[in-house]
Amino acid sequence: MIDPKNVKNKALVDWVAKVAELTTPDNIYWCDGSQEEADKLFNEMIAKDACVKLNQEKRPGCYYFRSDPRDVARVESRTFICSKTKNDAGPTNNWMDPKEMKEKLNGLFKGCMKGRTMYVIPFSMGPIGGPISQVGVELTDSAYVVVSMRIMARVSPKVLDVLGENGKFIPCLHSVGVPINKPEDDVKWPCNPENTYVVHFPEERLIMSFGSGYGGNALLGKKCLSLRIASVMGRDEGWLAEHMLILGVKDPKGNKAYVTGAFPSACGKTNFAMLIPPAAMQKKGWKVTTVGDDIAWIKPAADGKLYAINPENGFFGVAPGTSMDTNPNAMLSCAKNTIFTNVALTDDGDVWWEGMTKEKPAHLIDWHGKDWTPASETPAAHPNSRFAAPIENCPSLDENWEKLDGVPISAIVIGGRRPKGIPLVYESFNWTHGVYLGAMMGSEVTAAATDVKAGTLRSDPMAMLPFAGYNMAQYLGHLVKMGKNLSMTPRFYHVNWFRKSAEGKFMWPGFGDNARVLAWIMQRQNGEAKGRETAIGFVPNYEDIDFDGLEYSKDTFEELMSYDAETVSAQPLKEELYEQLPNALKIEREALLERLS
Ligand code: GTP
Ligand code: SPV
Ligand code: MN
């Protein structure tokens, strides 16, 4: 514990006192992020039956939580950008007048921590004290949030040293929204779904989240600070906060490059960031390393290159589908000191989820806490069940992952789940064309948000639809501008791992085999690989892809690479958003239509 007497930052001390006055917690506890502190909190939660200590021989340092079934993912309909004007929030964000919203929230927060402890979590996104890093302080009445934040962000007294007396921090206020007035209120997973609000005040750089204890709604350093607030800071200061993985790739000649990738939620960022090339490619010398799996902060440096850091310190990864076959690096990352939420529990105190093993266990306790057998009709793990694993566990961690100034970016990969009409990969003609492809991106909706219908195709510009902290049209305009005056301009690569055959099967093996596409991208950078120009961009010929170790016929490849003119030229954006787009992007659309005609 940090002794509050030693805290020198007056603004922080005042804010904590003001929030305590409003929310009336029984205690205030300043977190130091230590193991002892986490152990104490886990034990308290175990005593309340809110947490399960997993089999420590199989999963040392690992714990398991089941959420309230109404609190399992981000709630986009309750996420607000309360900028001064509605236009600043833009046509894709929920907006309410900031004054009105503050009044509403102050009403909800009034007395909401009664019977609970208010935890003060000082954290750094990015290495503590780094030039690109940001300091945040989260106030929360959830011990689950405390133990998760110390995995996902850097929680340490050193953060307060960096703040000093006058340093600025981003205030992040969170409550599960259930005061304990009587003993029955002290439930295992408190939440207040009717009154959930995840609110950002971009001009004030303030975050207030009420009523949900889950992931992106509650671990406020992640989507709220590192994307919604940071994107506004990036607009104002000339940098980018993106929903992107960052990976390193080494070719057989020893050339090393870094690539970022924007895929919507649950569309493959963690998997791509940790991919292991097929054996035949490894033998030739291909190697992929991991810098980050969800968020990239990207800044142009004096040398004219774009540099990216991963502001996070852990992975909050989708569990279902993760296995030693599909993503061994993720499996090894969550082998110890990991928190699992809404997966299933095995009879020997370990975890299981759909896709982890080929054979299903004969008996499990499912994410509802009920008995489950392979005959059960519902999945044992929630489709959005997750692991929070320390990044240091990752076997493929890149040697430069914590480099204070970041790693130089050579290429940007974008794409979503597109069952039809979109080829495996195509390369943008130039930066603006790349941003255009990003703007027109779409994907089948996944289980990562509760209130959008899974399975339907939706437009998701740069995978930022739920995460841009300001007007989406301005955001895309900012992105166009950021490509100007660079000495090394990354090209954009639109990829699609999710094309389906007429029989409804994935046409591309995906996962490790995505290294074959990455190799082509890398070779394009070096001017090595051939490719041909088409109406939509540069594409590889069959001979340009390394199929060593994979039987994949030329005919199937041609089918996989074919495009449907209507699909690739569709304009999926809301009319109101399209109208506001920068002209440069509208011209790209006209040029595309012209090339296709
Ligand atoms: P968020 O954490 O929500 O931002 O998700 P993400 O983009 O990191 O997605 P993740 O890598 O966790 O993948 C989500 C799901 O897609 C998992 O069930 C994966 O197994 C599956 N997946 C990932 N890559 C591929 C791929 O190349 N092909 C196929 N078929 N499925 C994939
Ligand atoms: C996503 O939904 O993109 C996630 C999970 O990475 S959450 O932290 O809940 O946003
Ligand atoms: Mn994400």
Image (cartoon, grey):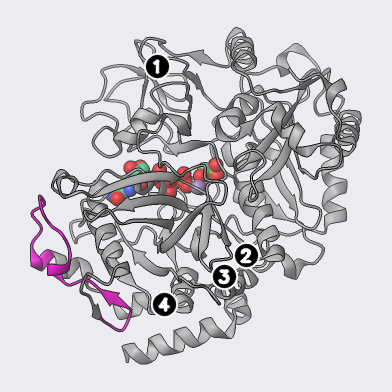
Q: Residues within 10 Å of mark 3 (few under 14, many from 20)?
A: many
Residue span colored magenta: 533-556
Asked if marks 4 and 2 touch (Cβ < 8 Å), the reply is no
Q: Residues within 10 Å of mark 4 (few under 14, many from 20)?
A: few
Q: Marks 1 and 3, Cα distance to the nearest angstrom? A: 43 Å
Reply above or below: 443 against 331: below
In the rendered structure, does residue 163 fall within the stretch colored magenta?
no
Tag on residue 484? none
**Which residue type carries mark 1?**
Arg
Instruction: Give the foreground label among 4 and 1.
Output: 1
The residue to which callout 4 is attached is 570
Q: Residues within 10 Å of mark 2 (few under 14, many from 20)?
A: some
Q: Marks 4 and 2, Cα distance to the nearest angstrom? A: 18 Å
**Which residue type carries mark 4?**
Ala
The kind of secondary structure element at disc 1 is loop
In the foreground, 314 or 472: 314
Instruction: Give the foreground label among 3 and 2.
Output: 3
Q: Marks 2 and 1, Cα distance to the nearest angstrom? A: 42 Å
Q: Marks 4 and 1, Cα distance to the nearest angstrom? A: 48 Å
Q: Position of residue 409 (x, y in %)?
A: 45, 60
The residue sitting at 59% across, 79% down in the picture is 581
The residue to which callout 2 is attached is 92
Q: Note whether ligand 3 is within 8 Å of mark 3.
A: no
**Which residue type carries mark 2?**
Thr
The kind of secondary structure element at disc 4 is loop
The residue to which callout 3 is attached is 479
Q: Image quadrant of residue 30?
A: top right
Q: Is residue 499 visible?
A: no
Instruction: Give the foreground label among 1 and 3.
Output: 3
Asked if marks 2 and 1 touch (Cβ < 8 Å), the reply is no
**Which residue type carries mark 3?**
Leu
